[in-house]
Image: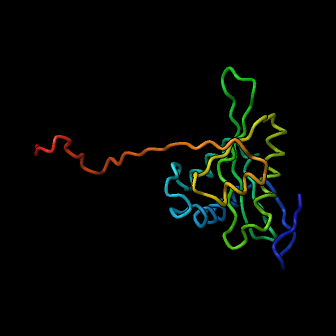
């Protein structure tokens, strides 16, 4: 699959990720998935995200490259629900280098992962992002996603000392 790459670069190519791509994919993820990106990420970006998804469903781990430079990636998996005839696709991570976002690379990655999921019998693709991540929401709506549902995530910091609710000293 070829799409237009950023000006002055070779043709964009979307291909399956290989083990040799792990360091560069990890670096792009570190650049994109920061606390500023989403302070409430319940998943954190680390090397185990890549390894786990690659080991479980390498067909749905893709990179976009121009020449020998990786510009972005998509990591997904499929989910079979017990007692359901449907197979779901879950796009877990989609990242494009910050300086070239909005250049069609994310759309190319999504198009290819959607094609591969369809080939595997997926009937519905699910993504999640923070409710305040407007660029991601606009991107996914442009790809045809709808039925936006907000989720509530709560956390409990186990390193803080518990407050005494009665106000009395122990």
| 43 vs 125: above or below | below
- How far across and down, in percent of the image, does residue 105 sit? 78, 63
Residue projecting furthest to the left: 169
Q: Quadrant of residue 24?
A: bottom right
Q: Quadrant of residue 29?
A: bottom right
Query: In which quadrant of the rendered image does the C terminus lie?
Result: top left
- How far across and down, in percent of the image, does residue 157 sit? 35, 49
| 95 vs 100: above or below | above
- How far across and down, in percent of the image, does residue 95 sit? 67, 60
Residue projecting furthest to the bottom: 8
- How far across and down, in percent of the image, does residue 151 sit? 55, 42
Q: Which color scheme did the rendering employ for the protein? A: rainbow
Residue found 70% across the figure and 60% down from its top: 20
Q: Please give the count of numbered marks on the rendered protein.
A: 0
Residue found 71% across the figure and 54% down from its top: 74
15 vs 45, left or right, is right
* Along the viewing direction, whichever of 50 and 101 lies nearer the viewer: 101
Residue found 57% across the figure and 64% down from its top: 30
Residue found 79% across the figure and 58% down from its top: 107
163 vs 58, left or right, is left
């Amino acid at each position: 699959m070829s799409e237009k790459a950023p000006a002055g670069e070779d043709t964009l190519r979307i291909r399956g990720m290989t083990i040799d791509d792990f360091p560069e994919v990890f670096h792009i993820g570190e650049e994109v998935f920061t606390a500023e990106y989403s302070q409430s990420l319940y998943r954190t970006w680390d090397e185990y995200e890549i390894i786990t998804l690659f080991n479980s469903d390498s067909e749905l781990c893709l990179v976009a490259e121009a020449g020998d430079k990786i510009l972005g990636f998509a990591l997904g998996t499929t989910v079979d629900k017990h007692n359901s005839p449907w197979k779901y696709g879950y796009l877990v991570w989609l990242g494009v280098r910050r300086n070239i976002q909005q250049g069609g690379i994310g759309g190319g990655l999504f198009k290819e992962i959607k094609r591969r999921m369809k080939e595997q019998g997926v009937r519905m693709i699910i993504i999640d992002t923070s409710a305040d991540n407007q660029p991601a929401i606009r991107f996914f709506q442009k790809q045809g996603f709808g039925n936006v549902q907000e989720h509530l995530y709560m956390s409990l910091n186990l390193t803080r000392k518990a407050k005494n609710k009665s106000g009395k000293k122990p």
